[in-house]
Image: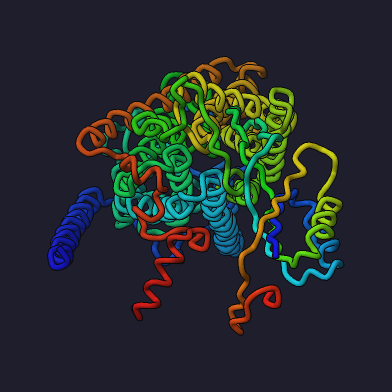
Amino acid sequence: MQNLFPRRAMKWISKSIVALVFAQLLCGSMSLAFADQSQPDPAGTATGDKFSVADAAGNPFVVPEPTDKSAPDYTKSKKEFDEFQAQAAREPLALKLADGVGHTRIATNFSWTLLTGYLVLFMQAGFALLTCGLVRKKNAAHLMMLNFAAYVFAFLAYYAVGYAFQFGAVAVNAAPANLGGVPTMNHFLVGSGQWGFLGGKGFFLTGPAYDAGSNCLTLFEVVFMETAGYIIVGAICERITFWAFLLCELFIGAFLYPISGCWVWGGGWLSQLGSSMHLGHGYVDFAGSSVVHSVGGFCAMALALILGPRLGKYGADGKPRAFPASNIVFVVTGTFLLLFGWMGFNPGSTLGATDLRISVVAVNTNLAAVAGSAAAMLLWYRLFGKPDITMACNGMLAGLVAITAPCAFVSPTASVIIGVIAGIVVCLGVLFNERILKIDDPCGAISVHGYCGWLGAVSLGIFADGTYGAGWNGVGSAAYLGKTGQGVTGLLHGDSSQFLVQLGGATLLAIYAFGATYIIFSAVNAWRSMRVTREVELVGLDVPQFGMLAYPEDAVEMLTAGSQAQQQGV
Amino acid sequence: MKRIDAVIRPSQLDEVKQRVTALGVTGLTVSEVRGFGRQKGHTETYRGSEYTVDFLPKIFVSIAVAEDLVEPVVDAIVEGARTGVIGDGKIFVSTLDDVIRIRTGERGPGAI
């Protein structure tokens, strides 16, 4: 057996390398096939010039030449263009200066996007603490390893294909101008134009994805994908085998998240429903209530359903039993780390500090968090006589998840209302899962991320007040609802079509995440059980799966085993 | 020689220790234990599911004493551990056949 293992491992490794090289070559040739004039800029020296300069309202410094002669305002645009050209010829120094200003503007946005991305990255530490604190001590090492391995493997999957699937066609409909644009990521693998379903450029971050602006987006988006990847841990822990968990992470990083991400953020069909079907500004999700959180949450729901409840969770009478949290200090510390990280998650999603809406976004995010927590605390106080600390923490996360989609489009007061509703929904959701659906969710991931994520995306369609997001998804750049500068508008402010597209889109994404996960992992589970054996589950997964305990001092048998080894001089 | 074991409330340990050592007792062993007597457990709710705390945390005090100290030590423990509310604990007194000090090999009352 000892000799067999390395040989098998070597075989596996060499196979993987061959597959990787082959995939690289394939992607390289694909990038060549779709080559075009504009070149990627890996060094970052050509990113940000006079074309990146804009005033506070986002109007460009360089007036573009109008091409469509049949447009009603062609004469006016042509006149503006001619005036700019004449002025530029008189003041060449101004143009030179504008190149510097443009570069600095992009650099400012780079700094913002990368730094907020690092904050989001640190949310992983918060998730690890939160979930570890919520489970029993015998599974603490298991929880830490799941959180750790999720980052590692999902990242590699996203690098290989995930980023290309999500943003391979971002330049077609949604080039993020704040980062200097990603002009060469412009090919849909499935679909085209306003009906794109899957991006198709930039596999293994080669070709057009090997670009400074594009990589800025990659860093920010990969940590978002990781968030979706971490969410499932809370629902499937204490019973899933390590190999099955790795499959789940590869699935999320390579397919599940990138596909829905393409539809909403990569210029895909959901985001274009405003232009193609005249439904509001298309499906809008600012920072990912649905794209990240409800996709992760409903994926977690499907997995928890396939795995079944933990042993002893439901008694013979069908009543749920409590497995109390092992470390409340971890739970609360983890929640605060998540709140801190969310200050990157939401304000960072402007992809630029030159978009001064960031302060409103930050305030809205915090307000929803405290409102959600207050609602959950008080509701639990009323229902059960004591405010459950873990539910207070879930309430804060529920508020954060729900405000993630609407945070840029609503007022502070609307944020408080959304937070309160989320705080109530998360409590009822936990009770509903535990008592009625009987889906065992140790950390409340389904209720926090699934239900409140859906709620957040829908609430955007209700509360968006039209003060921000003019021209979002290419809708209403000149005027919307008859007003110049009118942004994304919800039901309460006169745009019912926005509400409809939000309701439909959020529901569709939830069904997509649940359905795709359920079909694929039911098959995996039928092939080989994804769950650990009864004996392993009873003793705790730490030693059987990872060969160590998180707290070995607590285990008498570990201590005696150690002293025996000492006596034998091992 | 007698061995006095007492199960007391964790909050009363300091009180008991002070009173017992004031009597000249030189050694005392304590451990954290869980159990129930007439007090029984109580029900709590965690994330909406009820659970019973059957075994409550207590402190187990063990003291070996010469015959003449038995009554004063028992009195001191009772005084130190009593709050008057159900759950104050119990004291068990039993005969001790022998005591050995491991370092010197001494036996009997001198080894206490």
- A7 to the left or right of A390: left
What residue is rendered at 55% in x and 27% in y?
Answer: A430
Can residue A370 be seen in this snapshot?
Answer: yes
Q: Quadrant of the N terminus of chain A?
A: bottom left
Looking at the image, which residue is at 61% across and 29% down?
Answer: A487
Count of numbered circles on the image: 0
Quarter-wise, where is residue B72 in the image? bottom right
Above or below for A317 versus A457 = above
Q: Position of residue A169 (x, y in %)?
A: 35, 42
Tell me residue B85's x, y (percent).
Answer: 82, 38
Residue at 80% over, 55% down: B74
Q: Position of residue A497 (x, y in %)?
A: 53, 16
> What residue is at 28 percent from the left and 28 percent from the top?
A519
Vertical side of A471 occupied by A166: above or below:
below
Visible residue check, residue A181: no
| Up-down relation of residue A531 to residue A33 (above or below) | above
- Report the front residue among B33 and A222: B33
Nearer the observer, A101 or A241: A241
Q: Give the colour scheme shown.
A: rainbow
| Residue A437 vs residue B52, the one in the foreground | B52
Residue A5 is drawn in which quadrant? bottom left
Which is nearer the eye, B62 or A347?
B62
For this view, does A227 lie left or right of residue A544?
Answer: right
- Residue A186 placed where, x, y %? 34, 44
